[in-house]
Image: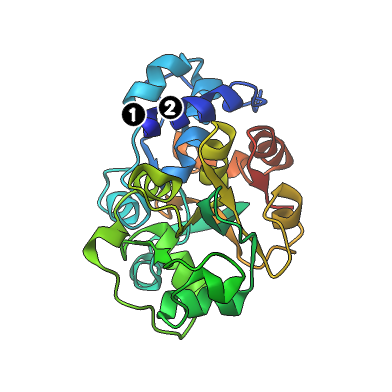
Amino acid sequence: MKKIIVLLTFLFILTSCKSPEFLKLSKDEYPIVDGSTATIPLAISLRAKITGENIEDLKNSTTHTKTTESFSNLINGNADLLLVYTPLQSVLEESKDQIEIKPIGKDALVFFTNKENTVTDLSTAQIQDIYQGKTKSWSELGGSDSEIIAYQRNEDSGSQVLMRKLVMKDLQMVEPEIELLEMAMGEIVEAVAGYKNNQNSIGYSVYYYLKAFIDDGENIKMFNVDGIEPNNDNIANGKYPFSEDFYVVIKKSEKQDSPARKIFNILTTQEGKDFINSCGYVAIK
């Protein structure tokens, strides 16, 4: 239920997106779009603006199979275009000769906790120590004398790929207990927010997705990292340390006049960037 409410929050924001006026397609012409969970609102708004379909109808029919699986769907012909975050390096290597991929926006991996947690800032080193199992109490970080409950994502999720790439690098993450391994972004937010009585939890997600939960009144807050607040400006200018691009992807074999290539092309123009910004995401400068 909470994921549905947050999706509705996304959609309320996205109804104000500016349309790329020179691109119009019928719903029958519109390509099959797949990708990451956090790009579902962008996918819905993009289709609604291009085809004129009703957002209320699209929200019930639009799904993404998540980052890694969507690449397989594209290569296997089960999708025509991806709006996606960074996949596993092995996935990129396997598909690089078959795809065209361009960055269209920036997001960031952010860390969050229950609002009742008195800790507001973490350094990169402190986050690394938490997820290596070296730091086990919030008292070591200026907080209460309580155990740190550190949630992780499953290995093929976009968030986990970013966690290993941007934060942990070559450091080994501690093996999580099974109940701390949340399979979906919405589930990890709900857990950290306190639905499982974990008032001293920490988790991670991408900024744009998490911001919808906060805007919806969820009982969570983001940590500043290395003294930098995660917000649109700091992500756009690169000040926030864990910023990362997200992409539009098609197969190289797409014809020049195909609907998928038309959308691929427009999202990398100034009109496309203006559209992405108007939807609340951060477009590539």
Name which quarter of the figure residue 166 lies in.
Answer: bottom right
Q: Position of residue 23 (x, y in %)?
A: 59, 26
Horizontal side, residue 180 vs residue 111: left or right: left
Name which quarter of the figure residue 175 lies in.
Answer: bottom left
Give the residue at mark 2: 5
Q: Where is residue 153 in the image (x, y as percent from the top left)?
A: 35, 60
Outermost residue toward the front in this view: 145
Pointer 1 local density, CA inside 10 Å: few below 14, some 14–19, many at least 20: few
Residue in front for this viewpoint, 135 or 170: 135
Q: Is mark 2 on a helix, strand or loop?
A: helix
Residue in front for this viewpoint, 246 or 203: 203
Outermost residue toward the left in this view: 178
Residue drawn at (63%, 42%) of the image: 281
Residue type at numbered disc 1: Met
Residue type at numbered disc 2: Ile
Proximity of marks 1 and 2: CB atoms separated by less than 8 Å: yes
Q: Where is residue 207 in the image (x, y as percent from the top left)?
A: 57, 50
Any part of residue 209 in sight = yes
When the figure is inspected, residue 231 is found, relative to residue 24, above or below; the finding is below
When the figure is inspected, residue 167 is found, relative to residue 229, above or below; the finding is below
Horizontal side, residue 72 vs residue 161: left or right: left
Residue drawn at (49%, 73%) of the image: 165
Horizontal side, residue 56 vs residue 24: left or right: left
Residue drawn at (33%, 50%) of the image: 70
Disc assigned to residue 1: 1
State the CA–CA distance, disc 1 to disc 2: 6 Å
When the figure is inspected, residue 214 is found, relative to residue 94, above or below; the finding is above
